[in-house]
Amino acid sequence: MSVIILLLLLLVIVFIITCVKIVPESKVYIIERLGKYKSCLNSGLNIIIPFIDRVANRVSLKEQVADFPPQPVITKDNVTMQIDTVVYYKVVNPVLYTYGVERPVIAVENITATTLRNVIGAMELDETLTSRDEINAKMQMAIDEATDPWGIKVSRVELKNIMPPAAIQQAMEKQMKAERERRESILIAEGEKKSAILKAEGEKESAVLRAEAQKIELVKEAEGHAESIRLHRDAEAYGISVLLKSGLSSEQVVALRGMDAFSKAADGRATKIIVPSELQGLVGLTAGVLESVAGARASSAQQDSTVKQTARPAVPVQIHETVESQGTGEEKK
């Protein structure tokens, strides 16, 4: 009797285990009754009829990642290269996913390979290397449309690696090296150009400053020369006024000015000067006057420090020591 009770208890436990199904979160169980689709069991506690209902498939509703191996593709310019892709997909209809296609992951892999060949075949090599976003968008749209009948939603497609042939890679490296050398040459040329421009601007500014300095020097020299002429004229006018105040007549002053002209004509190189006899008497009379005129001229020249040329004596008279005066027309040696 106890054995029968134990067998009944065992059958009850087995019945409970087989009829009670606990479904985890983010999963769905496909239930078939006598080989025909019955329902989907969502997450939580579910009860089925044992030995009649069975779990045909356990489907995950999480987003999944499928990393497919490299596929050989040919570009528009006949370059063969290897490209591997990564597909992000999610099951949105467990029934279609279970009954729509046999081995859905393999189906997604094949549709990805064919779509990749179609997209890359319409592009050249350079465009393929620089248009990954465009390729990803085109593949995602095409694969998502193709997998809709299978209950799969493709959210993203990425090109993981693009591997051109070895010869193409070497050519690309040479091209990259040449481009870098070209940029280096351009930078060096621009640096030299800026250096030459700055040097030319410096020389230009230096030349302008030198010209301005020379201009200022000439102006100062001209001002000094003009001041010298003014002082010379003032000294001569002062000497004439002193002569007039000393009691000499205008004719006698004119005669003395004639003696100054004689001395200038000789300029220290003549050996003889003809002196009229009427001027000989004036020489002693005007000796003191000449000394006062020379002193006035010297004091006037010392007042202006910028004057470079000193004025000559107002009435320079060169008179030799030996004088033979025997009347009008005699020579003075």
Image: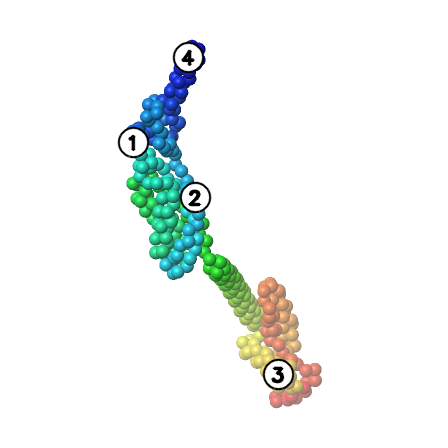
Disc 2 versus disc 1: nearer the observer: 1
Q: Secondary structure at mark 2?
A: strand
Q: Which comes sooner in the sequence, label 2 or label 1? A: 1
Query: Which part of the image, by quadrant, shows the C terminus?
Result: bottom right
In the picture as drawn, the residue positioned furthest to the right comes out as: 322
Q: Quadrant of residue 64?
A: top left
Label 4 – label 3 distance at C-alpha: 169 Å
Disc ID at residue 5:
4
* Marks 4 and 1 in Cβ contact (< 8 Å): no
* Residue corresponding to mark 3: 266
Residue in view at x 44 percent, y 50 percent: 70
Residue 197 appears anywhere in the view? no
Q: Secondary structure at mark 1?
A: strand
Instruction: Give, as a three-letter code, the residue at label 3.
Output: Ala
- Colour mapping: rainbow
Label 2 – label 1 distance at C-alpha: 34 Å
* Residue corresponding to mark 2: 67
Instruction: Give, as a three-letter code, the residue at label 1.
Output: Lys
